[in-house]
Amino acid sequence: MEIREYTEDDRDTVVRMRKLAFASTGEPPEKLLTPGTFGVLAHEGGHALGSLLINDFAQHFGGRPVPMGGIGGVVVDPHARGRGVASALVDTALRRMREQGQALSVLYPTVPALYRGRGWERAGVLERMTFPMDRLLMSPKATHRLATRRATKADLPDIHAAYLALAATVDGLLDRHEPTFQPEKLLDLDVATVVHDADGVLRGYLTADRLKEGLKVHDLVGADLDAQLTLLAELTSWAGVLDKVDLRVLDPAFTGLLTSQAVRFDMSTNQWLLRVVDLPAAVAARGWPNAAGLKGGAVDLDVVDEHAPWHAGRHRLVVDDGEVWLEPGGSGTVTLQARALGPWFTGVQSTHALRRAGLLTGDAPLLDQLVAAPGTPRLADFF
Ligand SMILES: CC(C)(COP(=O)(O)OP(=O)(O)OC[C@H]1O[C@@H](n2cnc3c(N)ncnc32)[C@H](O)[C@@H]1OP(=O)(O)O)[C@@H](O)C(=O)NCCC(=O)NCCS
């Protein structure tokens, strides 16, 4: 078996394999290669066996975007399954992401065992909530309703800035940089509302599509309470024709602190797995807001990671004067398995939980203090 980068000439083969695996309906994409993506194909004697793609993303942690390879479209043709093709593709992707400077990798798993065996672990969620309209109507009303209008091309930079201001405060959210993301696509959506103040300064936006089954809200971003409640009022304006709204949870302030859900409500959750591809690079790239409040200190780590030998072994994690970095060496008193790195780095699991799962040995309260998370990491984009 050989693995190579796929090209536009492989379009029909890759599209056929994906269609078979995921029963995808709808028009096949015009182009296989889109900006910001890189694909690999496994083949034998000229016959394709499987493929995957890596999206060039960056994901916020501690207020800073960390380069991340988002793996998607992992497929192996049925006749070639069960003999290590997916494993070989994933190993190739891991090396490639390291070369591309992607310190993290995330994927939505259909088969967690495949990825767990290679160091990915649960680290966050993508959630959608179904709001019955009567519940939305029970939520607070805007006392200072701001002006709203349909977004135009000229608004796109401000819309992205509003999104980024939020994303920098919610661990896990992407920075949605170009060319992987194309901002002008927002203008094709059924609903693209901006909310602005009397001076025309953008304070938030709402994007959604009107489907047969209801309103599917993509982003609801408000910089402050008035902006959020103004956009909430726009959602309730659908009360005459719709009895529910399907909302993607982007800002935990909106769904956690403003709206009035019932005791029971419908929520769909996609879990995602994260792998630290390159620990020193990941430590250098993320923000460490908690470090400012710490006296300083160090933890001696021993990383066990057979699939990413470049960062396996001993490192000293140093905290000093608000900065955090990794140096080679140290006594290796805390042992971390590859699968422990993601849950620790994202703050989604404590060292106690990692120890109970057999992924960490040793005692290191500093590791917990550093990443004490302001909530469950989340993504708002599926790939
Ligand atoms: C999932 C899929 C990619 C696996 O490909 P594959 O080449 O058969 O996988 P491998 O032979 O490399 O198996 C790697 C590991 O995953 C496990 N695994 C593979 N498929 C599995 C499945 N369907 N259920 C549970 N475990 C599975 C294997 O047991 C193996 O574990 P091991 O290393 O402990 O022996 C393939 O079955 C497929 O294309 N399925 C349909 C599409 C899909 O689900 N894609 C995944 C998107 S995230």
Image (spheres, rainbow, N blue to C red):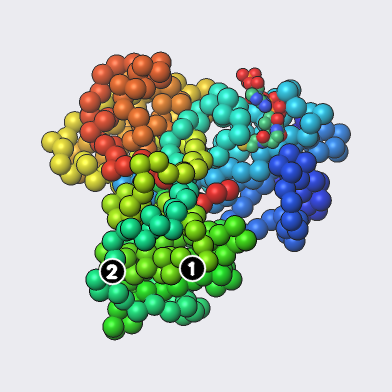
Label 1 sits on a secondary structure element that is loop
Q: Outermost residue, bottom direction?
A: 199
Judge by depth and name the residue closer to the eye, 222 or 242: 242
Q: Mark 2 = which residue?
A: 142
User: Of the residues shown, which amino acid type is indicated by label 1?
Assistant: Gly
Q: Position of residue 31 (x, y in %)?
A: 73, 59
Q: Are marks 2 and 1 in contact (CB under 8 Å)?
A: no
Disc 2/disc 1 C-alpha distance (Å)? 19 Å
Q: Residue at x 35, y 18 (%)?
A: 355
Task: Tell me the quadrant of the picture where the N terminus can be found.
Answer: top right
Residue placed most toward the observer, 154 or 6: 154
Amino acid at the residue labelled 2: Ala
**Between 232 and 383, which is closer to the camera in this rendering?**
232
Which image quadrant for residue 378?
top left
Q: Which residue is found at the position 34% from the left and 22% from the top? A: 353
Residue farthest to the left, as pictured: 295
Residue occupying the point 35% across, 79% down:
147
The residue located at (58%, 48%) in the rendering is 383
Sequence-wise, the earlier of marks 2 and 1 is 2
> Residue 35 at what x, y percent from top left?
62, 59
Q: Which mark is residue 240?
A: 1
